[in-house]
Image: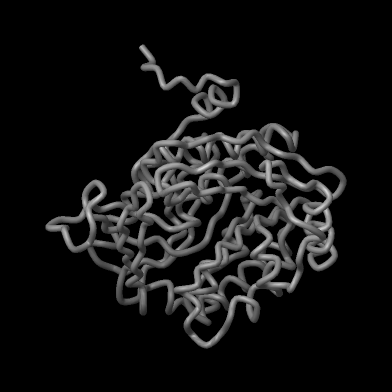
């Protein structure tokens, strides 16, 4: 099977143990994560060959990051070495009515100073079937945005499927450009679009015709279709547009679902009530990984969407950024086997 290629930044994540606040912490738990790296790990855990492309410093932390990816089955042979430092982010996990908090320390990270011409994208894509990126990467720096554009041009030329998760991060767009200045030209080259109504308005000035959800929680199909038809007019390469649907009742209780539009039909996934969230970070990335797996495996949009939502539902029970679940566990949840009993 040909590989899935993802491109972006992976960081060291430092979190106070349990649900402590930063002010209480004497120690930090260490994990590694980043949107595109999380997608690669998810796919590798689901049995899909995945290769993560990034740039890491030539020091012990860079080596440790590479080893962390390798232990989950992600191919790391296309990772560049260079630059000054590994990006870091600090996560304070929320609980009940107290939300979480993220502090980034990623300025001048190795990937933020990457330059066009450093990566041989034609060589990387020659044995690939899919390329995935997110809006986080071009938010890091102008040079990271330029390399993303370079990668997309090569991916289009190679004829592989391209997916994007808009993944807007307000704290990152601080090098003089707004997301709406950079993202539209990049996402025009993509086949599978993960974007919600806020992304559509922020990047393209597009709004749905009516409210997307009624007061009883049901989706307004006509409003969703109007939103997606406008996006399709703006993004003519797009074959599928997908939005996750999260409602936060507290930091510990969310409802979780998604919708998919393939140009002809609108599909809605079941809604899960996730009532005891362990870690929500990486939930969208686990959805993206599950969606790619589903679209490649089932050739059925409804089942692919259901798989993605079930996979990302399970991610909320796992500490760390990455979704460490098997296809058997996801399919069991899809079949309604969600009692949480011990498997003996």
Asked whether 56 or 14 is in front, the reply is: 14
Give residue 80's quadrant in the image: bottom left
| Residue at (29, 68) in percent of width and height | 58
Give the vertical position of 215 relative to 103 (above or below): above
Q: Residue furthest bottom?
A: 176
Give the vertical position of 104 relative to 307 (above or below): below
Q: Left or right? Give the position of 268 relative to 92.
A: right
Q: Residue furthest right?
A: 264
Q: x and y percent of residue 14 in the render?
A: 26, 58
Colouring rule applied to residues: one colour
Q: Left or right? Give the position of 285 relative to 263.
A: left
Q: Quadrant of the C terminus?
A: top left
Give the vertical position of 318 relative to 142 (above or below): above
| Residue at (35, 76) in percent of width and height | 83
Asked whether 24 or 180 is in front, the reply is: 24
| Residue at (78, 61) in percent of width and height | 208
Q: Residue furthest top?
A: 344
Q: x and y percent of residue 147 in the render?
A: 56, 74
Q: x and y percent of residue 337 in the render?
A: 52, 19
Q: Left or right? Give the position of 20 relative to 107.
A: left
Asked whether 50 or 15 is in front, the reply is: 15
Q: x and y percent of residue 50 in the render?
A: 52, 47
């Amino acid at each position: 099977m040909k590989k899935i290629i993802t491109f972006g930044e992976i960081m060291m994540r430092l979190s106070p143990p349990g649900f402590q606040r930063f002010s209480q912490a004497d120690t930090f738990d260490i994990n590694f994560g980043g949107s595109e790296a999380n997608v690669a790990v998810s796919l590798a855990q689901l049995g899909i060959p995945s290769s993560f492309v990034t740039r890491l410093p030539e020091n012990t932390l860079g080596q440790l990051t590479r080893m962390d990816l390798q232990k989950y089955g992600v191919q790391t042979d296309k990772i560049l070495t260079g630059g000054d430092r590994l990006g870091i982010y600090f996560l304070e996990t929320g609980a009940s009515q107290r939300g979480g908090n993220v502090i980034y320390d990623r300025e001048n990270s190795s990937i933020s100073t990457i330059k066009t011409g450093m990566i041989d994208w034609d060589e990387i894509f020659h044995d690939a079937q899919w390329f995935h990126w997110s809006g986080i990467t071009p938010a890091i720096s102008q040079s990271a945005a330029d390399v993303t554009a370079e990668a997309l041009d090569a991916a289009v030329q190679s004829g592989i499927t391209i997916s994007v998760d808009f993944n807007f991060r307000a704290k990152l767009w601080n090098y003089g450009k707004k997301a709406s200045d950079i993202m539209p030209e990049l996402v025009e080259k993509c086949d599978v679009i993960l974007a919600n109504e806020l992304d559509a308005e922020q990047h393209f000035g597009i709004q749905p015709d009516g409210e997307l959800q009624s007061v009883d929680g049901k989706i307004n199909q006509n409003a969703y279709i109007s939103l997606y038809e406008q996006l399709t007019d703006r993004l003519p390469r797009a074959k599928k547009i997908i939005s996750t649907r999260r409602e936060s009742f507290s930091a510990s209780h969310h409802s979780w679902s998604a919708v998919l539009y393939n140009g002809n039909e609108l599909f809605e996934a079941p809604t899960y009530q996730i009532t005891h969230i362990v870690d929500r970070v990486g939930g969208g990335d686990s959805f993206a990984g599950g969606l790619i797996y589903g679209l490649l495996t089932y050739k059925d949009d409804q089942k692919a969407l259901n798989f993605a939502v079930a996979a990302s539902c399970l991610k909320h029970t796992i500490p760390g950024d990455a979704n460490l679940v098997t296809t058997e566990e996801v399919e069991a949840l899809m079949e309604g086997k969600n009692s949480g009993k011990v498997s003996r």
